[in-house]
Protein backbone atom coordinates (compact mmCIF):
# COMPACT_ATOMS: atom_id res chain seq x y z
CA UNK A 1 0.00 0.00 0.00
CA UNK A 2 1.37 3.37 -0.96
CA UNK A 3 1.44 5.88 1.86
CA UNK A 4 0.03 9.28 0.99
CA UNK A 5 1.04 10.90 4.24
CA UNK A 6 3.94 10.35 6.54
CA UNK A 7 4.06 8.95 9.99
CA UNK A 8 2.54 10.97 12.83
CA UNK A 9 5.34 12.91 14.51
CA UNK A 10 5.41 15.11 17.61
CA UNK A 11 5.75 18.16 15.33
CA UNK A 12 2.54 17.28 13.49
CA UNK A 13 0.71 16.88 16.80
CA UNK A 14 2.05 20.22 18.05
CA UNK A 15 1.02 21.96 14.85
CA UNK A 16 -2.52 20.57 14.99
CA UNK A 17 -3.08 21.41 18.70
CA UNK A 18 -4.22 25.05 18.31
CA UNK A 19 -6.72 24.15 15.59
CA UNK A 20 -8.06 21.19 17.52
CA UNK A 21 -8.42 23.20 20.71
CA UNK A 22 -10.20 26.01 18.85
CA UNK A 23 -12.52 23.47 17.21
CA UNK A 24 -13.44 21.83 20.53
CA UNK A 25 -13.71 25.23 22.23
CA UNK A 26 -16.24 26.40 19.65
CA UNK A 27 -18.08 23.08 19.70
CA UNK A 28 -18.72 23.02 23.45
CA UNK A 29 -18.70 26.82 24.01
CA UNK A 30 -15.84 26.90 26.52
CA UNK A 31 -14.48 30.28 27.61
CA UNK A 32 -12.13 31.86 30.12
CA UNK A 33 -10.03 29.70 32.38
CA UNK A 34 -11.74 26.55 31.13
CA UNK A 35 -9.96 26.96 27.78
CA UNK A 36 -6.65 26.37 29.57
CA UNK A 37 -8.07 23.26 31.23
CA UNK A 38 -9.39 22.05 27.86
CA UNK A 39 -6.06 22.66 26.13
CA UNK A 40 -4.17 20.88 28.92
CA UNK A 41 -6.28 17.75 28.64
CA UNK A 42 -6.35 17.70 24.83
CA UNK A 43 -2.54 18.04 24.73
CA UNK A 44 -2.16 15.44 27.47
CA UNK A 45 -4.36 12.94 25.64
CA UNK A 46 -2.55 13.43 22.33
CA UNK A 47 0.85 13.22 24.02
CA UNK A 48 -0.05 9.97 25.76
CA UNK A 49 -1.47 8.51 22.54
CA UNK A 50 1.64 9.57 20.65
CA UNK A 51 3.86 7.73 23.13
CA UNK A 52 1.58 4.69 23.17
CA UNK A 53 1.84 4.33 19.41
CA UNK A 54 5.62 4.31 19.78
CA UNK A 55 5.51 1.78 22.61
CA UNK A 56 2.96 -0.45 20.88
CA UNK A 57 3.57 -0.43 17.12
CA UNK A 58 0.40 -2.47 16.55
CA UNK A 59 -1.74 0.63 17.22
CA UNK A 60 0.44 2.92 15.13
CA UNK A 61 -1.69 2.58 11.99
CA UNK A 62 -4.90 3.22 13.93
CA UNK A 63 -3.40 6.28 15.59
CA UNK A 64 -2.25 7.61 12.23
CA UNK A 65 -5.73 7.03 10.81
CA UNK A 66 -7.32 8.88 13.73
CA UNK A 67 -4.94 11.85 13.55
CA UNK A 68 -5.32 12.34 9.79
CA UNK A 69 -9.10 11.91 10.05
CA UNK A 70 -9.20 14.65 12.69
CA UNK A 71 -7.00 16.90 10.53
CA UNK A 72 -9.18 16.41 7.45
CA UNK A 73 -12.34 17.04 9.47
CA UNK A 74 -10.92 20.25 10.91
CA UNK A 75 -9.80 21.37 7.43
CA UNK A 76 -13.27 20.72 6.00
CA UNK A 77 -14.82 22.69 8.85
CA UNK A 78 -12.42 25.57 8.27
CA UNK A 79 -13.12 25.63 4.53
CA UNK A 80 -16.85 25.65 5.26
CA UNK A 81 -16.43 28.63 7.60
CA UNK A 82 -14.39 30.48 4.97
CA UNK A 83 -16.97 29.74 2.28
CA UNK A 84 -19.76 31.08 4.52
CA UNK A 85 -18.01 34.44 4.82
CA UNK A 86 -17.84 34.82 1.04
CA UNK A 87 -21.30 33.43 0.28
CA UNK A 88 -23.70 35.78 -1.45
CA UNK A 89 -26.61 36.62 0.78
CA UNK A 90 -29.80 36.68 -1.21
Image (cartoon, rainbow, N blue to C red):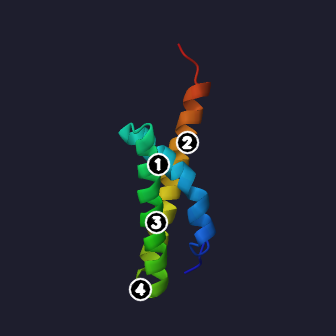
**Of the image marks 2 and 4, the number of the one nearer the N terminus:** 4
How far is mark 3 from mark 1, CA to CA?
15 Å
Q: Which residue is drawn at 51% across and 63% down?
A: 68
Q: Residue at x 48, y 69 (%)?
A: 47
How far is mark 2 from mark 1, CA to CA?
22 Å
Q: Which residue is drawn at 59% across and 78% down?
A: 2
Cβ–Cβ below 8 Å for labels 3 and 1? no
**Above/below status of 57 relative to 44:** below
Count neighbours of disc 2 (C-alpha within 10 A) and say few if under 14, some if 14 to 19, many if 20 or more.
Answer: some
Dot 2 corresponds to which residue? Answer: 78
| Nearest the eye: 55 or 85 | 55
**Above/below status of 55 relative to 79:** below
Q: Nearer the viewer, mark 3 or mark 4?
A: 3
Q: Which residue is drawn at 47% across and 53% down?
A: 39
Instruction: Using the image, tell me which numbered label, if any, was put on residue 9.
Output: none
Q: Give the structural element (helix, strand or loop) at label 1.
A: helix
Q: Give the structural element (helix, strand or loop) at label 4.
A: helix
Q: Give the structural element (helix, strand or loop) at label 2.
A: helix
The residue furthest front is 33
How far is mark 2 from mark 3, CA to CA?
21 Å
Cβ–Cβ below 8 Å for labels 2 and 4? no
How far is mark 2 from mark 4, CA to CA?
32 Å
Dot 3 corresponds to which residue? Answer: 46
Count neighbours of disc 4 (C-alpha within 10 A) and say few if under 14, some if 14 to 19, many if 20 or more.
Answer: few
**Of the image marks 2 and 3, the number of the one nearer the N terminus:** 3
**Above/below status of 53 relative to 70:** below
Dot 4 corresponds to which residue? Answer: 58
How far is mark 1 from mark 4, CA to CA?
32 Å
Dot 1 corresponds to which residue? Answer: 36
Q: Tell me where residue 25 appears, x and y as whole percent.
A: 44, 42
**Of the image marks 3 and 1, the number of the one nearer the N terminus:** 1
Q: Give the structural element (helix, strand or loop) at label 3.
A: helix
Amino acid sequence: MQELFGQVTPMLVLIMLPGLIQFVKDLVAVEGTWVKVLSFFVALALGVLLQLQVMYPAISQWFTLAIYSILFSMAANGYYDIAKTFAVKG
